[in-house]
Image (tube, rainbow, N blue to C red):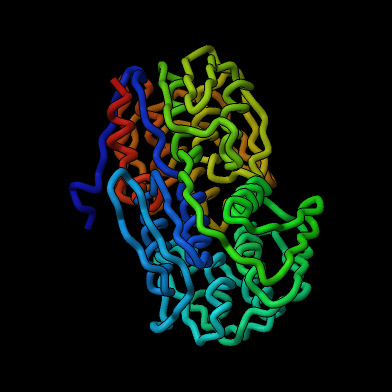
Amino acid sequence: MEKEEDIIKLKATKVEGQILAPPSKSCMQRLLCAALLSEGETNIFNSDNSEDSQNALKLIQQAGAKITDLKNNRLQIIGGININDHKFNVGESGLGIRMFAPVLAIADKKIELDGEGSLKSRPLHTLIDALQQCGVYSDSSQGHIPLKMSGMLKAGEINIDGQISSQVLTGFLMALPCAKGDSKIFVKNLKSKPYIDLTIEVLNKFGIQVANDNYEIFSIPGTQKYKETEIVCEGDWSSISTHLIAAAIGGRIEINGINVHSKQADIKILQILQQVGAKIEVTENKVIVEKNDLRSFYTDATDFPDLFPGLVMLGAYCNGTSVINGVERLFHKESNRAEIIKREFSKMGINIEISENKIIVSKSKIKNAIIDPHNDHRIAMAASLAAITPDTEIIITQSNCVKKSYPNFFTDFKNIIK
């Protein structure tokens, strides 16, 4: 039965205010993985408290890292893999299992990785195949968690298909620098290339070198050492994208604490908002977006699928018909995101058509609705945008699903809608 505190009611007429960008869970999880592999001390400022990041923090502590939560939002981590308890749980994080599996295989222990919720239905075939190419025997439940591993990760040449996710590649880019010997990763069909840029940026900050040849061949020298470092976890473009879209359709917002030169894939939201005609001002660590008459747009969201729900909502407020390519990236998320977008957003009166690999959305008359996000944080956040329509109330069930990436989303959102 739905708990009363899990139900959010939203109604507004305009958007106005300021927000400090929350930390990026994509960046934070990579930093935690690198900190585990470092033999020295890592200090992370602006650390993230989303469920995915907290599960990653528990995992590295269980794997041997020593952690101190210091004042001034600083997390101190003494790295080093030392595994005693062989059962790990990554929660509902797809990045968590795909990144930490090859990293934990460095230890040459029998390890079991499990998870929760929608992760139980997300396929691991690409990860299992890559592990076996590196000498790690793995067993799974017909390609799903729990994943059992044994054997030490070995250097060499491996092939990875990046069609479903770039996260498997991220895991081997993090792990193979520690292997004895040089490695090469041959990649085909790579999606979400910006996330690989983010991974390599984190590696470089920890002193790890990787050569990238057109995202098709990655050359990795072996026996490298992660150095100790102090680093700031960036603000999250995925999380603030909803607030930026809200301002474009209903008012004005100022976002502070955001890296405008970020490697994060979802920084693409700025370019799309410029395309539709929103007023945008960008300065160092700050973005201002203001309402304007919005025109329809086309974009290929293959490399930034987390923006899909918000972009569909944006299309409903743009004059004409908008087209978003890349639907194939939505099938293995926290939900079958394409199906849930169509089903739930149609309740609000949004005109949506899914054709081949595209979502087509035309300007719509938004109406009152009760939205079930199917435990998908991106759906819940995007659906909130409908509340900006005058005389419209949106009710969102399972609202606590936003804890996965942005625990304070509804607090922040309510602070900017009037």
Q: Relative to 178, is 345 above or below?
A: above
Q: Seen in the image, is 393 located left or right of residue 104?
A: left
Towards the viewer: 62 or 381: 62
Towards the viewer: 320 or 122: 122
Q: Residue furthest left?
A: 4
Q: For the point 46% across and 44% down, which residue is it?
A: 232
Q: Residue furthest top?
A: 293
Rendered-image quadrant of the N terminus: bottom left
How many numbered discs sit on the rendered protein? 0
Towards the viewer: 400 or 315: 400
What x and y, as percent, mark residue 128? 63, 76
Q: Relative to 104, is 364 above or below?
A: above
Q: For the point 57% across and 80% down, which residue is it?
A: 142
Rendered-image quadrant of the C terminus: top left
Q: For the point 36% across and 53% down, which residue is it?
A: 75
Q: Seen in the image, is 220 located left or right of residue 350?
A: right
Towards the viewer: 286 or 74: 74
Q: For the point 32% across and 18% down, which residue is it?
A: 13
Q: Seen in the image, is 156 located left or right of residue 281?
A: right
What x and y, as percent, mark residue 171? 60, 64
What x and y, as percent, mark residue 31? 50, 55
What x and y, as percent, mark residue 23? 42, 43
